[in-house]
Image (cartoon, grey):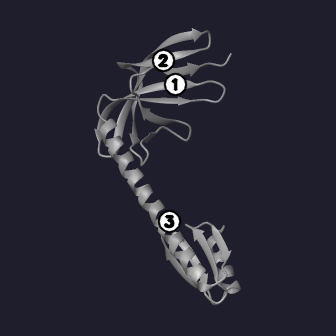
Amino acid sequence: MSKFDKTLERIQSWYPNAVKSESHGHTFFVDENEFTMIAYRGKSSKAVVRTRFKNQIALNSYFTTFKEQAQKAIDSNLKRLEILKAENEAQIKTDAIFVSSWGYEQTNVSFYQVITVKGTKVTLKKITQERQYDNADSGSTSGVKDKFIGDPFTLRIGRYGLRMDSVQSLRFWDGRPVYWSSYH
């Protein structure tokens, strides 16, 4: 039994008259005898709402408003995902260049050119870069199209675009120089 299921079981024992319902990505317990509402988002075992009200009207009003706001959040997230999908489709094309910038004490920059796009898979190849120095250990850099380094590799197009690993995400490169730095 999961921690979430144990939590729901405990709440049901504390509020035996509470009605359990699931909607809008939440699990609700509403006890109309004690004017109490408890809500859990997703499978989290920590309540996002645990409130007691003065009367039934206040409880119903809050419950209705809460569900409306949850639906607005769901709609907003879906709209954002549609926009991201459209951006991915517009940007992830053959010959497009993507950049990765990451680091802690220094800013590492790498450029990748799209070789092929097949469905949700993209074949990329790293390209060289031309660095300009502002001082000995920092400056700006630009990718050089069609000047490849190393072997091609394949990535899957995710919900939020292209991701190399847990550290590096790729973003579409607009052609403007990117800041880099090195640690000495």
**Mark 3 lies on residue:** 69
* Quarter-of-image position of residue 150: top left
* Label 1 – label 3 distance at C-alpha: 41 Å
Q: Are marks 1 and 3 in contact (CB under 8 Å)?
A: no
The residue located at (46%, 19%) in the rendering is 177
The secondary structure type at the circle numbered 2 is strand
Q: Please, is residue 81 above or below residue 11 in the view?
A: above
Residue 127, how many percent across, how many down?
41, 22
Q: Are marks 2 and 1 in contact (CB under 8 Å)?
A: yes
- Left or right, 148 with respect to 30, comes to left
Q: Which mark is residue 141?
A: 2
The residue located at (57%, 10%) in the rendering is 134
Number of residues whose C-alpha sits closer than 10 Å to that of mark 1, classed few (under 14), some (14–19) or many (20 or more): many
Sequence-wise first label, 2 or 1 = 1
Sequence-wise first label, 3 or 2 = 3
Is residue 92 visible in the rendered structure shown here?
no
Number of residues whose C-alpha sits closer than 10 Å to that of mark 3, classed few (under 14), some (14–19) or many (20 or more): few
Residue 64, how many percent across, how many down?
51, 75
The amino acid type found where label 3 is placed reads: Gln
Residue 145, how many percent across, how many down?
35, 20
The residue located at (63%, 75%) in the rendering is 38
Q: Which mark is residue 109?
A: 1
* Foreground of the two, 53 or 156: 53
